[in-house]
Amino acid sequence: MTEQPTTEADIHLIKQILPHRYPFLFIDKVKDIVEGESAVGIKNVTYNEPHFQGHFPAAPIMPGVTIVEAMAQTATVMAGLAMDVIGKDVLVYFMTIDNCKFRRMVVPGDVLELHVSVLRRRTKIWRMKGVAKVGDEIACEAEFSAMMDLKE
């Protein structure tokens, strides 16, 4: 009997793959995972997140860089499952962010869906496309690459 691939990651599995922790862990769940191909991250945006204290107190808006980081964290969970890094010491480094566009503000109360797909993979280096949505509206899109450095 073959083991079924993981298609969803809760916060406990996410923390076994990502080195990030509060206040820099920007995803709550990853679903629709196709290992080595695509995934959808979920970020429940709440007012009590630290960046809203200064960005901006009278009109809280999720910083664009945190949206891109949330897409990258979603991609890392999907890639980490494909590379079998659960519970291992791994660091992830951004290498490029290209064609990044912000199309809609993300505010407290929004549920941000982070759709990521693989464009190319070379051993430890992954090139991805990400589209962040709130409902049917695109909030951000970008292409990015990162290296996953697994400490042996």
Image (cartoon, helix red, strand yellow):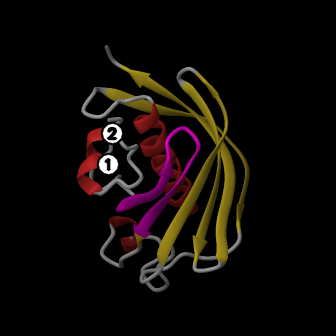
- Residue in the image at 32% along x and 44% along y: 20
Viewport quadrant of the C terminus: top left
Q: Judge whether 11 appears above or below 19 on screen.
A: below
Q: Is residue 2 above or below residue 69?
A: above
Q: Are marks 2 and 1 in contact (CB under 8 Å)?
A: yes
Does the magenta segment cover residue 149?
Answer: no
Find residue 17 and name its label: 2
Would you say 84 lies left or right of 32 here?
A: left
Task: Give the class, few, some or many, for how many residues have Cα within 10 Å of label 1's Cα (few <14, many ≥20).
Answer: many
Residue at position x 68%, y 59% from top?
A: 141
Question: What amino acid type should be assigned to the residue bearing mark 1?
Answer: Ile
Badge 2 local density, few (<14 within 10 Å), some, or many (20+)? many
- Tell me the distance, in whole angstroms, between the alpha carbons under discs 2 and 1: 5 Å
Q: Amino acid at mark 2?
A: Ile
Residue sitting at 49 percent across and 32 percent down?
Answer: 93
Which label belongs to residue 129? none
Q: In the image, which disc is placed on residue 14?
A: 1
Q: Is 30 colored magenta in this rendering? A: yes
Q: Secondary structure at mark 2?
A: helix
> Is 78 displayed left or right of 96 in the figure?
left
Left or right: residue 117 compared with residue 78: right
Magenta span: chief secondary structure: strand
Residue 19 visible in this rendered orientation of the protein = no
User: Horizontal and vertical percent for residue 3?
Assistant: 34, 38
Position in image of residue 34 (x %, y %): 52, 47
The residues colored magenta run: 27-43
Residue 145 on image: x %, y %:
62, 36
